[in-house]
Image (cartoon, rainbow, N blue to C red):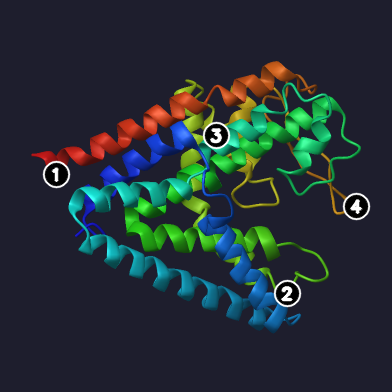
């Protein structure tokens, strides 16, 4: 059955990566994440309270609803002819991967005369006062961190748990991006969503960092792991530190969020340059094709036991 059969899940994953590579996002307002976001907002409007328990109810409710919906879709797919089921499964899965959109969005910073405005669409930090170097630095950090959240983690949970696992992961990630902030409104309400997102991304973040280092033949795992532990997030520092070492620049440092300055450690070789320019951003983006091909290869290798 396509919903649970490992070989068909792997084939769907392979096709989904190819579709995302070729077409990127194409559903617009019909995108599943848009629907998840509307569900989160609707729950908040009706049931918000400044409490951890109410935030926990949000997590349980949204996760259960999207799990049931994804399971229903999976059961419908099972009832279809295999070829059609496989195509639709791959298309649905591709909408929940974001490598093409992430790459295009960050790449747009290179030729934008005012990258601050474009960057504001990608990050939660304050961008109005950033200089060009800071914008490029933020672009690299965004690309590195979202390689985990938007590519490796969704693929990881799809291969392990099928479509329901993928959709529940995206719901957790979306809840964190909407309410998982340490602000007056969300400090309590978003706490469980933030902690669950940390847990869900623990393995994918480290896999992403390891993949970045291996593909660039940089074997500084000890340095990356040591630096990453200094990040406020238990996960974000790993791919960011890996990309800093690979692209020979320093990332991190003081960053302003919602009008408050947050101190961050520096990531990368201490002897690398502090000023980030287009060559460093292009270096980060050059990882797109090696990462895509390595994921295809790993999935193909995963199919071998089923081909015997």
Q: Nearer the viewer, residue 305 or 112?
A: 112
Q: Is residue 136 above or below residue 94?
A: above
Quarter residue 243 falls in: top right
Please tell me how crowded label 2 is: few (under 14), some (14-19), or many (20+) other residues with Cα within 10 Å.
Answer: many
Mark 2: which secondary structure? loop
Where does the C terminus fall, quadrant-wise? top left
Q: CA distance from mark 4 to mark 3?
A: 34 Å
- Report if the CB atoms under discs 1 and 4 are less than 8 Å apart: no
Which circle's residue, 1 or 4, is located before the other in the chain? 4
Residue 259's tag is 4
Question: Which residue is identified by label 3?
Answer: 222
Which circle's residue, 2 or 1, is located before the other in the chain? 2
Where is residue 267? Give x, y as percent. 69, 33
Question: Which residue is identified by label 2?
Answer: 188
Q: CA distance from mark 4 to mark 2?
A: 20 Å
Mark 4: which secondary structure? loop
Question: Which residue is identified by label 1?
Answer: 306
Q: CA distance from mark 2 to mark 3?
A: 35 Å
Which residue is depicted at the point 59% across and 71% down?
39
Q: CA distance from mark 1 to mark 3?
A: 36 Å
Where is residue 303? Give x, y as percent. 21, 40
């Amino acid at each position: 059955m396509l919903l649970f059969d490992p070989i068909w899940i792997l084939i769907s994953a392979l096709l989904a990566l190819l579709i995302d590579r070729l077409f990127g996002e194409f559903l617009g307002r019909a995108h599943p994440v848009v629907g998840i976001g509307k569900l989160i907002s609707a729950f908040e409007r009706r049931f918000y309270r400044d409490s951890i328990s109410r935030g926990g109810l949000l997590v349980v409710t949204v996760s259960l609803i999207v799990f049931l919906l994804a399971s229903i879709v999976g059961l419908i797919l099972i009832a279809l002819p295999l070829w059609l089921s496989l195509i639709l499964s791959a298309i649905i899965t591709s909408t929940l991967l974001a490598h093409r959109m992430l790459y295009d969005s960050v790449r747009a910073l290179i030729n934008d005369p005012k990258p601050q405005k474009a960057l504001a669409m990608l990050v939660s930090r304050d961008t109005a006062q950033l200089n060009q170097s800071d914008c490029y630095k933020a672009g690299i950090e965004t690309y590195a961190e979202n390689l985990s959240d938007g590519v490796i983690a969704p693929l990881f949970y799809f291969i392990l748990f099928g479509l329901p696992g993928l959709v529940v992961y995206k719901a957790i990630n979306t809840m964190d991006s909407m309410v998982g902030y340490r602000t007056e409104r969300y400090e309590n309400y978003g706490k469980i969503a933030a902690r669950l997102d940390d847990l869900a991304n623990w393995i994918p973040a480290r896999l992403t960092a390891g993949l970045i280092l291996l593909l660039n033949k940089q074997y500084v795992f000890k340095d990356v792991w040591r630096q990453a532990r200094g990040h406020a997030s238990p996960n974000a520092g790993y791919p960011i530190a890996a990309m800093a070492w690979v692209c020979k620049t320093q990332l991190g440092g003081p960053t302003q969020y919602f009008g408050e300055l947050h101190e961050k450690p520096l990531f990368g070789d201490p002897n690398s340059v502090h000023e980030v320019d287009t060559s460093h951003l292009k270096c980060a983006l050059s990882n797109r094709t090696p990462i895509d091909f390595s994921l295809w290869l790993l999935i193909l290798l995963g199919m071998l036991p089923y081909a015997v």
